[in-house]
């Protein structure tokens, strides 16, 4: 069983105390353990600010972009290994794992190219030059430049690769060091990505840190120059953004939580037509891709009452061809939900709907 370590102050640190156990959700086999107990979060943040921040601010946008390109290449080089880890720890099919891992390397590459277009500058002009006073002898210019803090990223369970990379790409290109804290249940993939980046020498000292396990008092130590980005549930988001230190310092907090997306079928859409088939294809894909565990997934489907039976019949036909099971087995096209908590929530939600008069179609 793999022991996940934190990468802080440019070294790997094994946590102490009781560890959280990560499992293969298809077999319930324990495959890794993680604990952050004993990690010095204060030293972690200060090292990132002092060492990583100074290193990034000394680099031009183009140089930061080259760093992102090296990260993307390192991840792509280990693609097959990372795909297997996503299947084992996340319950992903191979195609769903590609969605996550290729999304990670692709996003890093996209921001690397943006860095090249921004060129040799270290900051950007914001708006026009403004005359201060009665003559043009004294003028002012707003600029966009790196903050002197650290960006702490608390990521969700469903995209352990893409979630790490998409947030890190933005912050690193902007000149801010990153402390990445993935959801523990599926952190085996993000941990291995961090190992790959360190082994490849893709990240300079202090630029990217990694927390395996609980966040402890990490968030409580953030201040005015720091940034917190969180992806997850709205209840946790409310707790985080209400932290006294964040409110007192007016620290930047970015929340992505609880998206509710709908597919709506217009009354003029005829069964069997191109728009009808496109609608069914999109709904079926969103129900099954990543086992529905993605923030862009369709959560509600609205159809005219006169079309309801036809939609249910055609959608059930499409979904009946899906083979659910262990994604490591050939022929399986949808894996399990990632955690036992997710499974419990799905069953509870279905129970409430049935109690309220809903009919199980498939």
Image (tube, rainbow, N blue to C red):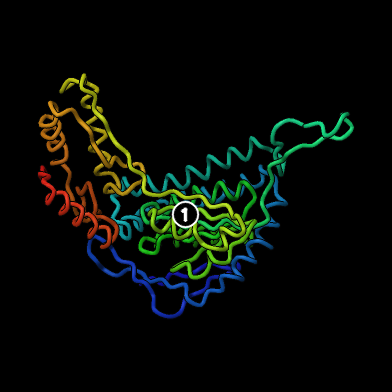
Name the one closer to the observer, 1 or 257.
257
Percent from the top left, x then y, of residue 297?
A: 31, 42
Image quarter for residue 137? top right
Q: Is residue 312 left or right of residue 41?
A: left
Name the one closer to the observer, 252 or 330.
252
For the question of whether residue 203 can be seen, the reply is no
Percent from the top left, x then y, of residue 61?
A: 66, 43
Secondary element under disc 1, as helix, strand or loop, is strand
Name which residue lies at 31% across and 59% down. 88
Percent from the top left, x then y, of residue 138?
A: 87, 35
Name the one closer to the observer, 56 or 65.
56
| Vertical relation: 274 (above or below) 160 | above
Image quarter for residue 155? bottom left
For the question of whether residue 105 can be seen, the reply is yes
Name the one closer to the observer, 248 or 188.
248
Name which residue lies at 35% across and 55% down. 86
- Mark 1 = which residue? 230
Classify 10 Å Cα crowding around label 1: few (below 14), some (14-19), many (20 and above): many
Percent from the top left, x then y, of residue 114?
A: 59, 38
| Vertical relation: 207 (above or below) 38 | above
Q: Is residue 183 left or right of residue 354?
A: right
Name which residue lies at 20% across and 53% down. 349
Q: Is residue 108 left or right of residue 234?
A: right
The quadrant of the image that shows the N terminus is bottom left
């Amino acid at each position: 069983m793999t022991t996940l370590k934190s990468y802080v102050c440019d070294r790997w640190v094994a946590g102490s105390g009781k560890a959280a156990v990560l499992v293969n959700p298809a077999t319930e086999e324990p495959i890794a353990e993680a604990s952050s107990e004993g990690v010095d979060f204060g030293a972690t943040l200060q090292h990132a600010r002092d060492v990583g921040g100074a290193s990034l601010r000394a680099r031009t946008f183009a140089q930061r972009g080259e760093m992102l390109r090296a990260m993307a290449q390192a991840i792509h080089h280990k693609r097959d290994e990372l795909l297997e880890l996503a299947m084992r720890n996340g319950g992903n099919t191979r195609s769903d794992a590609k969605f996550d891992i290729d999304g990670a390397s692709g996003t890093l590459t996209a921001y690397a190219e943006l860095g090249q277009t921004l060129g040799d500058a270290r900051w950007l002009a914001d708006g026009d030059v403004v005359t201060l006073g009665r003559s043009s002898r004294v003028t002012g210019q707003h600029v966009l430049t790196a903050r002197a803090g650290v960006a702490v990223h608390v990521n969700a369970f469903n995209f352990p690769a893409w979630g790490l990379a998409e947030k890190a790409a933005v912050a690193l290109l902007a000149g801010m060091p990153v402390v990445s804290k993935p959801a523990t249940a599926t952190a085996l993939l993000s941990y291995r990505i961090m190992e790959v980046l360190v082994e490849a020498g893709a990240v300079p000292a202090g630029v990217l840190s990694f927390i395996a396990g609980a966040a402890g008092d990490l968030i409580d130590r953030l201040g005015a120059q720091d940034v917190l980005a969180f992806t997850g549930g709205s209840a946790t988001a409310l707790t985080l953004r209400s932290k006294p230190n964040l409110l007192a310092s007016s620290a930047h907090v970015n929340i992505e939580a609880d998206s509710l997306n709908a597919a709506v079928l217009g009354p003029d859409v005829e069964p069997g037509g191109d728009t009808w088939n496109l609608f069914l294809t999109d709904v079926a894909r969103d129900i099954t891709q990543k086992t529905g565990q993605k923030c862009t997934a369709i959560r509600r489907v609205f159809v005219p009452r006169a079309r309801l039976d036809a939609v249910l019949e055609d959608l059930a036909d499409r979904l009946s061809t899906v083979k659910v099971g262990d994604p490591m087995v050939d022929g399986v096209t949808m894996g399990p939900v990632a955690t036992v908590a997710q499974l419990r929530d799905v069953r509870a939600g279905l129970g409430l709907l049935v109690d309220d008069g809903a009919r199980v179609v498939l």
